[in-house]
Image (cartoon, rainbow, N blue to C red):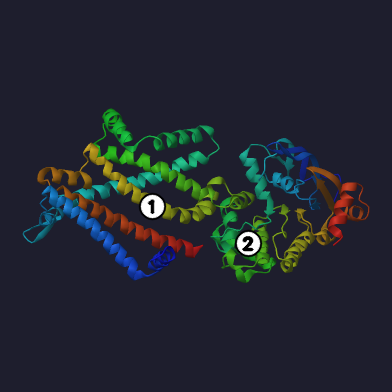
Amino acid sequence: MNRTQVRRWWRLSQQSPWIATLQFLIFMALVMWVVLRGAAEMGYQWQWYNIPEYLWKEYKGELYPGQLTKGLMVTLEMTFWCTIFTLLVGLITALLRMSNSWSGSLLATIYLEVVRNTPLLVQLYLFYFVLSPIFGVDRFWTGVICLTFYEASFVAEIIRSGIVSVDRGQWEAGDAVGLSRRDAYRFIVLPQAVPLMLPPLTGQIINLIKHSAIVSVIAVADLTTEGRNIIADTFMSFEIWFTVAGIYLVITLTLSVFVTWLERRVRVRT
Amino acid sequence: MTENQDPIIRLTDVSKFFGEFQALKSVNMEVQLGERVVVCGPSGSGKSTMIRCINRLEEHDAGRIVVDGKELTEDMGNILAVRREVGMVFQQFNLFPHLTVLRNLTLAPMRARKLSLKEAEEVAMQYLERVQIPDQANKYPSQLSGGQQQRVAIARSLCMKPRIMLFDEPTSALDPEMIKEVLDVMIELAREGMTMIVVTHEMGFAKTVADTMVFMDHGEIVESAPPSDFFTAPESERTQLFLSQILSH
C-alpha cells in the first residue's frame, strides 16, 4: 500500500458510519482493557454489587434515598440557590458595568478582575476561613455565596454581551419616542437580549453544577463529599468515583440536551 | 409663517466633536413653527449629527440648543420633555422587531404619555390609517416591506403627537420603488403644517415641500435659502458643485 492508497482508505473510513463505529468500539475496548488489566494487576476487588445501596435503600417495602442520592440532593439544592443568586448578582454587575456612574463601573470591574484572576479554591478558603467566621455563616451557605460570586462574574459578561448585541438603533428609537431608560430596558432591550442569553446562561449553570464539587473541601455534604466518605469506609474507590462521575454526567447531559433544544427554539423565533 | 415669532428650534454656535474630529462647527439655525426645512450636503458633512443633536441623541459640546422654549442641558427632565415633542424617523427604521406593528405604536404613548391601552390603540389605528396600512397592525415588522416599515416608523413617531418631526435620510435604505410611498406620506404631513427638518437627497421632494433649503459641508451651514433661490442661483461655489453633482443624473 503506497501513500495515496493509505490516504484514500483513511478518507473512506472517515465517511463510513460502520468504520467509525468500529473505530469507536475498538478504542473503548482498549480503554476498558487498560482499566481492568490495571485493576487486576493491583489486585483490585470490584464490588459493583455494593453500589445500589448507596443510591437507594428499601425498608419495609418503602424506598429511601441512599448516601449518594442524599449528596446529590445537596448538590442540586446548592445549584438551585446559586442559580438564583448568580443571575441576580450577574445582572446587577452587568448593569453597573454599563452604567454611566464611574464608581459603579469601577466597582464592577474590580470585582470581575479579582474573581476571575484568583483560583476558585483560594476564594473558597478565603470565604470559609475568613468571612464565614466573621459573619457566622455555615458551610452550606458559605459554599453557595462563594460559588455565586464566582459564577456571577461569568454570568455578568453573558448578560452584558447580550444587552450590547441589541442594535444601537433600538436604544435610539426608544430615546426618540421619549421612553425613560428603565422603560427602554424593560420593553425594548431586555426582551430582545434575553433570548440571546438563554443558551449561554444554561451552559453556565452546567458549569455551576460541576464547580459545586469543590465545596467538598469545606465538608459540605454534597455528592462528591459523600463519595469520599463512602470510599473512606469501604475502599471502593473505583466503583464510587465511576458512579459519582456518572451521576454528574446524567444531570449535565440532560441540561445540555435542554440547551440544544432551547438554541433551536430561539433561532426559529428570530 | 410670521417672521417676528419666536423660533421653535434655535441652534446657537453649536459645536460637536467625535474625538478629534469636529462634526459641527458653530452651527446657527432657526426654525419657525410650521416651517419645513430640508438639509442636504455630502456624506460626513454633519447633517445627521445636527438633527440628532436636536433631540439629544447626540450631546453637543458647545453652544446652545433651545427647542420649544426648553434648553437642552444635562437636565434629564428637559431632555425627555423635548423628546416627547420631537418625533424622529431613522434611515434604518429602527422598529422594535419583537413587537407587533400595533405594539410598536402604542408603547410610547402608554409609557410616556400615560394613555390607557384603549386610547393608545385608537390613536395608533388612526395613524396607521393615515399611512395607509391599518391592515398590517398585527404583523411583525419583519413581515413588512421596507416602505411599509418606514411608514410604520413615521406613524410610531406621530402617535406621540409631536410638534416637530425630524427625518434622518428616511428613504436612503429603501428600494427605489418604495421611495414614493414614503415621500407621499411626508408630503401629506407637510401639507398639514407639521414643522419638519428633513435630511435627504431627494431634491424633487425638497422642491415640493421645503420652505428653506440648508446646505451643509464639513460641519458648517454653507448656505440657507428658499428653494427658489437655492436651486436656481446658489451663492456658494460648494453648493453649486454639490447641486451639479446631485442633479446631473
Per the image, label 2 sits on a secondary structure element best described as helix
Query: Identity of the amino acid at label 1?
Result: Gly
Whether residue A254 is visible here, answered yes or no, is: yes
B176 and B74: which is toward the camera: B176
Both labels 2 and 1 in a single chain: no
**Picture quadrant where residue B201 is located:** bottom right
A43 and B183: which is toward the camera: A43
- Mark 2 surroundings within 10 Å by alpha-carbon count, few (fewer than 14), some (14 through 19), many (20 or more): many
Whether residue B119 is visible here, answered yes or no, is: no
Does A114 sit left or right of A183 as displayed?
left
What label sits on residue A203 in the rendered view?
1
Asked if marks 2 and 1 touch (Cβ < 8 Å), the reply is no
> In the rendered image, which residue does mark 2 sit on?
B123
Does A149 sit left or right of B7 as displayed?
left
Q: Residue at x 62, y 56 (%)?
A: B94
The picture places residue B168, in percent across and down from the top left corner, at: 72, 53
**Picture quadrant where residue A261 is located:** bottom left
Per the image, label 1 sits on a secondary structure element best described as helix
Does B119 sit left or right of B164 as displayed?
left
The picture places residue A103, in percent across and down from the top left corner, at: 51, 32
State which chain disc 2 sits on. B
